Image (cartoon, rainbow, N blue to C red):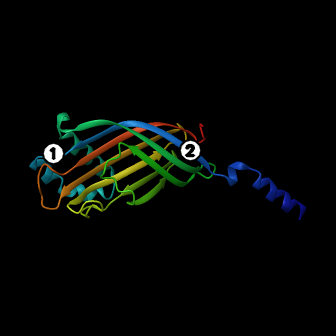
Amino acid sequence: MKQFLLTIFFILSMPGLTESSKVVCELNGEYSITYKDLKKTYLSEGIEFFKNLARQTQQSLFLLDRAKSNFAESDWSRDKVYVVQYWNLDSANETMESLKYSIEPSPIWIYPDASSKIDISSEGPSVTHFLENEDKHPLFDDLLVDFYQVKNSINWFTGKGKLKVDIWLKHKDGARGKSPKVAIIAQGNCEPQKKKF
């Protein structure tokens, strides 16, 4: 009995096993938006492209980057973006308990209650929020989802966080030149969360 109580006391006194760490990441990056449409040749090639994107294969991610490169640089309106991620992590067990984040300026097309999935790799956790292709965007009655992904990640080893957003929407009525395509990429350093004031 004495040995059992000593073991429980030893386990409870080890902070790494009983407490999670709160980590804050401050990221800087770029917010880009265009309302231009792809040319017909790329659009016809991309019919299967958006369906494949839902499966998140390497090929689908390559096709998304390729589709983006078909826009002229002048088609994109760009601005700086500042992101703060609040992670609650258990690094001893390499698990993630929660994530909150804020984006300034915040694009109106980001839906905070989108479905999400958590992936834990050997480099660290990532949380991907998504909406299904062809669904109506929950905040806009006249817009359908072509592709929607908001991915937050943190690296156990470098102590860096990252946010990557790709949102492609289209009008229900097929109106050309009015469908937003949004891209955000931001990265920065993470540190233990503590009050500064």
Numbered badge on residue 63 = none
**In the picture, which quadrant includes the C terminus?**
top right
Mark 2–mark 1 CB contact (< 8 Å): no
Residue at (29% x, 60% y) in the render: 139
Label 1: element kind = loop
Residue at (56% x, 51% y) in the render: 88
Label 2: element kind = strand
Q: Who is closer to the viewer here, 58 or 112?
A: 112
Residue at (43% x, 59% y) in the render: 117
Question: Residue 56 in the image: x percent, y percent?
Answer: 34, 54
Q: Who is closer to the viewer here, 70 or 138?
A: 138
Q: Which residue is mark 1?
A: 36
Q: Who is closer to the viewer here, 18 or 139?
A: 139
Residue at (18% x, 46% y) in the render: 35
Numbered badge on residue 23 = 2
**Is residue 176 shown above or below 186?**
below
Q: Residue furthest front?
A: 197
**In the picture, which quadrant includes the N terminus?**
bottom right
- Is residue 52 rendered to the left or right of residue 120? left
- Is residue 89 rendered to the left or right of residue 15? left
Q: Earlier in the sequence, mark 2 or mark 1?
A: 2
Question: Residue 90 in the image: x percent, y percent?
Answer: 60, 51
**Mark 1 Cα shell of 10 Å, populated few (<14), some (14-19), many (≥20):** some
Label 2 sits on what residue type?
Answer: Val
Label 1 sits on what residue type?
Answer: Lys
**Mark 2 Cα shell of 10 Å, populated few (<14), some (14-19), many (≥20):** some
